[in-house]
Amino acid sequence: MQPKTTIWDLEPHTAAKHEILRRYVQAWAPILSQGKFPHLVFVDGFAGPGRYSKGEEGSPLIAIKAVIGQPRPITAQVDFHFIELDKKRSDHLASEVRAVDLPSNISTKIHGGRSFQDAFPDVWNTYDPKPGRIRPPTFVFIDPFGFKIPFSYVAKVLRAQSCEVLITFMFEEINRFLSQGQQPENFDDLFGCRDWREGINIKLPKERLKFLHDLYQRQLTQAAGARFVRSFALRNERNTMDYFLFFATNNELGLKKMKEAMWHVDESGAYTFSDATDPNQTVLFTAEPDRSLLTRLIVDKFAGAETTPSQIEHFVVCDTAFRETHYKKVLQVLEDTNRVMPVNSPAKRRRGTYADMNLRLLFGPKQEL
């Protein structure tokens, strides 16, 4: 439910979401600026007032400080755009931003009193590349209270080089209005298609949840062309599904860094935070990953095949909920039990080590694993 006051209490799942944002931007800015991009753009589509009732920082301040607080200063020009429809909140945000000592290469613009639908095209068109130039890498954070998110905007971002989105998909509210058959035009805009209508007749809650989740994920990959999409489930204090976070990118390194951010978020006990890209294979983010599940996934993929740590890592990063740091312990156990055998292993190699990413590894047949 959207707060009626200018500032409000910070909820636990919002704090988790902000920690993900902080960690990702901390990685995003130096990677791209060191990659010789002289100009970066960050867009917060529903920026809010910049601070919560007990003094906690909101997403605009978190993003700014993630950039200016780097151990090695970012030298690229970084433009921040904060869109906020509520004028009192945007004014409050402006005062918070003014209090931050910004380096000369950091610019901020607050689009106060304007909706995301209204302001985003102007922001996007500001950076239309001239002939022979490219659009600056752009990260768009879309975190609404409702669901008025034009899919055409999302697709436009993902079709541009080096541009990414992190979207809050407000499942609980979407599901409620879907059941009432209201706002068909808004749902057409949200999904970028009319297929959502099939969900109206799905009565079982779990089946409808899966349908809506999978439809939006399909649209991000097939309609918008994102190579990599991960979704993350957040439940509220009543342990009911509140919303999904969808991250979409065309960059494998971006996917790695988002997963790193996700796996560093602590469980508070007040909410459930998990990877939900495959609703049949939910993975909780905890200090120690579920290596039994990861073992099954790796074995199912590579049984009877010869492969390399490099290929295994690519599979783990791109096709599972797990990180690139998780699979080597799995390989150690498989090698210790002779279910994976090195092929032509160097004489000096120590058993259970995989520093050589091109080491040939032979998996036994599936029925023996």
Image (cartoon, rainbow, N blue to C red):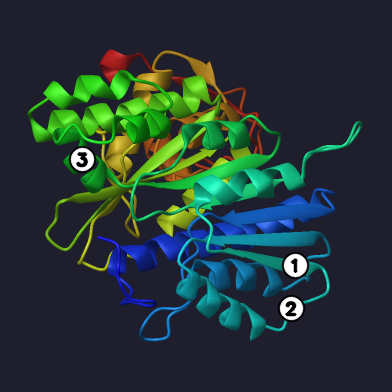
The three-letter amino acid code for the residue at tag 1 is: Ser
Q: Which residue is mark 2?
A: 102
Whether the residues at callouts 2 and 3 have beta carbons within 8 Å, the answer is no
The percent coordinates of residue 37 (x first, y second) are: 82, 49
Q: Which residue is mark 3?
A: 177
Mark 1 burial class by Cα count in 10 Å: few <14, some 14-19, many 20+: some
Is there a contact, CB below 8 Å, between mark 2 and mark 1?
A: yes
Q: Residue at x 32, y 27 (%)?
A: 214
The amino acid sitting under disc 2 is Leu
Q: Residue 80 placed where, x, y %? A: 67, 62
Could you tell me residue 295's position as x and y percent?
34, 34
- The one nearer the camera, 363 or 266, is 266
Residue at the disc numbered 1 = 107
The residue located at (42%, 55%) in the rendering is 263
Which is more toward the observer, 349 or 190?
Answer: 190
Q: Quote the CA–CA distance across marks 2 and 3.
A: 42 Å
Instruction: Look at discs 1 and 3 and give the one toward the viewer.
Output: 3
Q: Earlier in the sequence, mark 2 or mark 1?
A: 2
Q: Is residue 204 left or right of residue 331?
A: left
Locate residue 250: give its quadrant: top right
| Type of the residue with mark 3 | Phe
Describe the element under mark 3 as helix, strand or loop. Answer: helix
Residue 257 visible in image: no
Circle 1 sits in a helix, a strand or a loop, which is it?
strand
Q: Earlier in the sequence, mark 2 or mark 3?
A: 2
**Going 59% across and 42% down the picture, which residue do you hit?**
164
Left/right placement of residue 210 relative to residue 291 reads left
Does residue 23 appear in this view? yes
| Above or below, 320 relative to 275 | above
